[in-house]
């Protein structure tokens, strides 16, 4: 697969996807979205890794949607672009394996929305995050108005979106937007260590946790709890060798082999 805006590298069970448009701070245009959609649809790649880490080349993770490209949009084109971005970010949110955002620098507007669609965020201590669309007379258009309040609460989300000021990685950590901080020079290493830890756990259990949390957030609490019990019960069917191996390994005081 040849890409103009993406780089992909596999290290054992971990995939590293780098947004590679540093001259425009990795701003998202239709070309970037097309390539992302193509990459995320590749079953062969996704099924060959257990965790995907997404990061950016240069000083930005992603500085947002491409402002230059948006200048001439008609209402229909703006709607379509918003839908394209949402579909791609939903592909990330619904990807069967966990996705970790390694935020190496600016994660602004659509860039933060990309990070929000990932499952876990690790940020460089020097990164800046924010939803500055209001400064352009815009609103977040790739589900940021929905994902941020679910992650950080409505008050924090409104504060960030209405003021449009960036925050430091440390502030994002305090708000629960970022789960781990790392010095800039070891960000990838720290993110990969985290990815390897996740990759060493029961792979189907990890996938199921992602589905439970994602689906559960869309359901009334009672239904979400029922869904969990049903899936928990299913893990005890006879053909669930992962559970058998996990429990046997614990009782035999050895590492599970899955
Ligand atoms: N789009 C296009 N080009 C960009 C973007 C962007 N979002 N951000 C930076 N660039 C370009 C700059 O124009 C510049 O290009 P050139 O060298 O050709 O002039 C190059 O990248 C380097 O940028 P700077 O010189 O500005 O670098 P600085 O280090 O001085 O500043 C900043 C870095 C602070 C990140 C600054 O570039 C900036 O403020 N960028 C814009 C951030 C922003 O407002 N992002 C939100 C965009 S809106 C959005 O994401 C909406 C999403 C929803 C869309 C819904 C569908 C319609």
Image: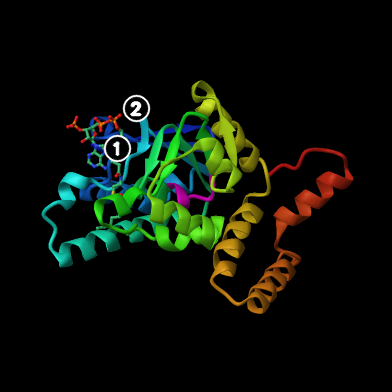
Image quadrant of residue 237?
A: bottom right
Q: Is residue 166 magenta?
A: no
The stretch of residues the image draws in magenta is: 115-120
Query: What residue lies at 82% left-to-right and 45% top-to-bottom?
Result: 249
Q: Secondary structure beneath disc 1? A: loop
Most foreground residue, 85 or 9: 85
Mark 1 C-beta to ligand 1 under 8 Å: no
Picture quarter with the C terminus: top right
Q: Which residue is mark 1?
A: 26
The number of numbered badges drawn on the structure is 2
Identify the residue at horizontal 14%, vertical 51% (top origin).
Answer: 71
Instruction: Using the image, determine if residue 44 lies above or below residue 80.
Output: above
Q: Residue at x 60, y 31 (%)?
A: 193
In percent of width and height, residue 229 lies at: 72, 72
Element class at badge 2: loop
- Crowding at dot 2, Cα within 10 Å, few <14 / some 14-19 / many 20+, comes out as some
Dot 1, crowdedness within 10 Å: few (<14), some or many (≥20)? Answer: many
Residue in the foreground of this view, choosing between 196 and 203: 196
């Amino acid at each position: 697969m040849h890409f103009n805006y993406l780089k992909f590298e596999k290290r054992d069970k971990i995939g590293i996807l780098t947004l590679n448009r540093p001259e425009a701070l990795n701003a998202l245009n239709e070309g970037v979205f097309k390539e992302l959609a193509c990459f995320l649809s590749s079953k062969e790649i996704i099924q060959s890794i257990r965790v995907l880490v997404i990061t950016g080349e240069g000083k930005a993770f992603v500085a947002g949607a491409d402002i230059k490209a948006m200048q001439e949009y008609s209402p229909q084109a703006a709607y379509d672009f918003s839908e394209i971005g949402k579909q791609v970010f939903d592909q990330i949110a619904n990807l069967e394996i966990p996705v970790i955002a390694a935020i190496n620098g600016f994660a602004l507007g659509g860039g933060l929305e990309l990070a929000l669609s990932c499952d876990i965020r690790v940020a460089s201590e020097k990164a800046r995050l924010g939803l500055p669309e209001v400064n352009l007379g815009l609103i977040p258009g790739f589900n940021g108005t929905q994902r941020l309040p679910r992650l950080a609460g409505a008050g924090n989300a409104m504060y960030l979106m209405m003021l449009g000021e960036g925050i430091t990685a440390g502030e994002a950590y305090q708000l629960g937007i970022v789960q781990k901080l790392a010095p800039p020079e070891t960000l990838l290493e720290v993110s990969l260590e985290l990815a390897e830890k996740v990759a060493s756990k029961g792979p189907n259990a990890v996938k199921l946790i992602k589905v439970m949390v994602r689906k559960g957030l869309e359901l009334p609490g009672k239904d979400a709890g029922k869904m969990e019990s049903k899936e928990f019960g299913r893990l005890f069917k006879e053909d669930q060798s992962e559970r058998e191996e996990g429990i046997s390994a614990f009782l035999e005081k050895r590492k599970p082999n899955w």
